[in-house]
Amino acid sequence: MMDEQAPRPRVAVIGGGISGLSAAHRLLELNSECDIHLFEADSRLGGVLQTSKTDDGYLLENSADNFITNIPYALDLCRRLGMEEELLPTNEALRKAYVVRNGKLFPVPDGFVLMAPSKMWSVITTPILSWAGKLRLAKEYFVPIREETSDECLESFVTRRLGKEAYERLVQPLIGGIYTADPTKLSIQATLRQFVEMEQKHGSLIKAAQRKEAAGKKNESGARYSMFVAPKQGMGDVIQRLQERLSGQAIHLNTPVSAVEKTDDHWTVQTPDEKYAFDAVIMALPAPHASKVLGAFPVLTENLAAIPYAGCSVAILAVDEKQIGRPVAGFGFVVPEIENRKILAGSFSSAKFPGRAPEGKVIIRVFVGGACHPELADLSDDEMKQVVMKELGELIGLNGEPEKFLVTRWMGKMPQYHLGHLDRVATLEEEAARLPGFELAGNAYRGVGVPQCIQSGEQAAKRVLDYLSSR
């Protein structure tokens, strides 16, 4: 415990996204005497988490519209914010994901979790794979364990174990809907290490999935929607609650930070108008921005700048359900790269959770761009509308004009965990550990999901306070 007579510890949190907000909130939870200054270059907090509500009854999410619960950090935060009773489960009756094959939508085989099939009959009967593809997938049971311990890309891992067709038709689109990444560069160890561990422990992904199923652990198809929840008032409500908790602290909006440096006894944070002194700093900016701010630390700068980012645009449509000629009894669909279409995925937000749209209306969110097609994410609104309406017309029979159409562009917002990512993160963490009172937080390091971002921020806060109490 800190000496009650000691000055209030001054901590700077740089970046007002969910990682930075979680860090600031945790600082305050663990030490109410903290003097926290949060710096955000934008005019609002929350980063990509944005919820908007319209006068005619729509609740629209501009990025993530839920979070997973088997990684507990988002759920725990909502409990501490007094939001647990307001969390909505997904609609069990429609808890299904689809994959496009030859322009038609087919459900992901029951029990197929990203790349681990637990129910082989559903794989045998799916029209998504040819008989050759099904037989090759079934042979996964006998594929030997990879002896090498070097990093492996997603494409190599899945093709080696499940075959090329299962990779192209099932795994690539399911993973692509999460990471918007190039699977030939994506590190399996950095993104989906649990499947590497399944191979090493059980000798087979099928064996591992079946044993997990036999043990009675819940195992849902596709994107595991049963494990997802959302605040009743949208993801933006988490941001609002965090902001309210921090109301007594210094929140600097529209205040970009240009430099962070270390002197003998404190840290300095330079903004366009002022230089501040702090006992500790939590850097929660995206890696490219952090690299520019940390020019005084070459190893950090070099490795942060080496983390690539990709962009994606989200087109949001509101339509009458009668405009959909081929309704989909599920939460959404993903599009394999091999289909040569111009969209990555489509999601029916109003099917997932109640209260998102008026009766008889449907919210469709369409994802465009990603690492493999960055040029599509940068289309103009009119061009984006033409592309999206054509694709949805062909895939779900959408016709007529949407009641609403808006595009949110998240250019350069998704870090890409390429081969060697974990080694780079280890170097960053080692270098940060050499700087007393300095911590890194955010989605650039050990997880891109909302729970992982919260975990990153909260753990950085804990380490900062441990350091301050030990001085």
Image (spheres, grey):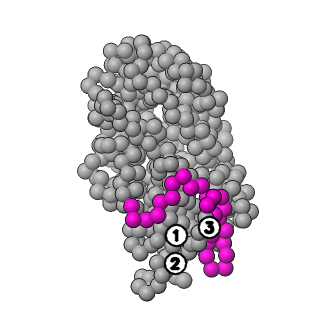
Residue 444, how many percent across, how many down? Answer: 59, 52
Q: Which residue is drawn at 37% across and 15% down?
A: 323
Q: In terms of sequence position, does the residue under pointer 1 or pointer 2 come before the other? A: 1
Tell me the crowding category of disc 1: few under 14, some 14 to 19, or many 20 or more residues within 10 angstroms, Cα based.
many
Q: Circles 1 and 3: CB distance less than 8 Å? A: no
Q: Is mark 3 on a helix, strand or loop?
A: strand
Mark 1 vs mark 3, foreground winner is: 3
Q: Name the residue under label 3.
A: 275
Mark 3 Cα within 10 Å, few/some/many (few <14, many 20+)? Answer: few
38 within the magenta span = no
Which residue bears the numbered disc 2? Answer: 468
For the point 46% across and 71% down, the residue is 35
Mark 1–mark 2 distance (CA, rounded to whole Å): 10 Å
Q: Is residue 323 above or below residue 266?
A: above
Residue 364 or residue 189, whichever sits in front: 364
| Mark 3 and mark 2: Cα distance apart in space | 21 Å
Q: Furthest-front residue in view?
A: 273
Sequence order check: which comes first, mark 1 or mark 3?
1
Pointer 1: what residue?
Answer: 11
Q: Name the quadrant containing residue 441.
A: bottom right
Which residue is pictured at 43% across the width and 35% down the height?
A: 222
In this rendering, position of residue 57 left or right of residue 365: left
Is residue 173 shown to the viewer in this render?
no
> Residue 156 or 293: which is nearer the viewer?
293
How far, Cα to Cα, is label 1 from label 3?
14 Å
Q: What residue type is labelled 3?
A: Lys
Q: Does the magenta stretch include residue 262?
A: yes
The magenta stretch spans which residues? 247-273
Q: Are marks 1 and 2 in contact (CB under 8 Å)?
A: yes
Q: Can residue 174 be seen in this view?
A: yes
Local crowd at mark 2 within 10 Å, few (<14), some, or many (≥20)?
A: some
